[in-house]
Image (tube, grey):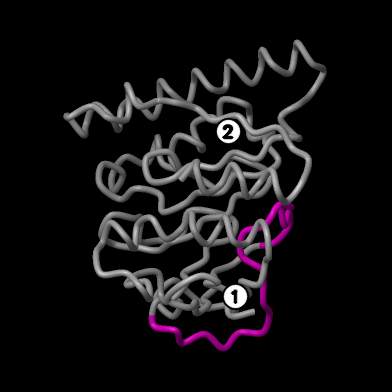
Amino acid sequence: MNSLLVPAFLSAEDVNVIVVDWSAGAGDINYATAVANTVTGGQAVARFINWLNQATGSSPAFFHIIGHSLGAHKAGIIGRNLDGRLAYITGLEAALPGFISNTDNRLRAEDSAYTEVIHTNAGVLGFLTPLGHVDFYPNGGNNMPGCDSQDCDHARSYFYLAESLTSGGFTGRRCASYLTAMSANCFLPGSLRMGGLVAKTGSTGIYHLDTNAEPPFSRG
């Protein structure tokens, strides 16, 4: 994920990128321990951001937090420990296992001013139902073109985000529900770009779009 997203951000705009190495917490062989560590890890990152802002005069309103799988829920923990003042959270394929009933630690829309979620293995490795202000279900949220495994589907979310940062092009059609998004049965008026550098604050809804099987993934 980092090898894709860091160059994409740096090529798209003059920004500072901070990568959090929480492999000691996320890589535990006991998955339940890794789930619990999303909370302690998120709290630690929030403390770091508070320290950084005190040292530099910055504020949470200048931060875009991105997390994949367990990291998507961790992004929510960071945001709520900063009182929801983050500008932008992107939840990439927020993990389903360990979070079906774990509502207290699940990513929520109000964890930032604008929270966007991209679902690419919904209902299997990734969370099925909407979690953000805006939820995108590319290709119906599962079985990504060009993939032949659930792991590939699960990872596609950060490939799409990286491409959106440098070239945009992913435009979703508004859907009545996540079920219509997953069945590509969306006919509501309105469209919205997926991903990108700038928070689409004030936008809400569920969106479907189709992608190509290989880069460029966007169909324009």
Q: Quadrant of the rendered structure where residue 171 is?
A: bottom right
Q: In this image, 83 relative to 1: left or right? A: right
Looking at the rendering, the stretch of residues picked out in magenta corresponds to: 183-203
- Pick the front one: 147 or 30: 147
Magenta-colored stretch includes residue 201:
yes
Image spot of residue 205 (x, y percent): 59, 67
- Pick the front one: 57 or 188: 57
Q: Quadrant of the rendered structure where residue 163 is?
A: bottom right
Image spot of residue 52 (x, y percent): 69, 16
Around disc 2, counting alpha carbons within 10 Å, would you say few (fewer than 14), some (14 to 19), or many (20 or more)?
A: many
- Pick the front one: 123 or 24: 24
Contact, mark 1 vs mark 2 (Cβ under 8 Å): no
Camera-near label (1 vs 2) is: 1
Q: Residue furthest right?
A: 57
Residue ID at (35%, 27%): 23
Q: Earlier in the sequence, mark 1 or mark 2?
A: 2
**Residue 172: assigned label:** 1
**Residue 109: assigned label:** none
Three-letter code, disc 2: Gly
Around disc 1, counting alpha carbons within 10 Å, would you say few (fewer than 14), some (14 to 19), or many (20 or more)?
A: many
Instruction: Please tell me whether residue 95 is drawn above or below residue 16 in the rendered image.
Output: below
Mark 1, secondary structure of its residue = strand
**Residue 79: assigned label:** 2
Three-letter code, disc 1: Gly
| Principal secondary structure, stretch drawn in magenta | loop
Residue ID at (76%, 46%): 13
Residue ID at (57%, 88%): 187
Image spot of residue 134 (x, y percent): 58, 60
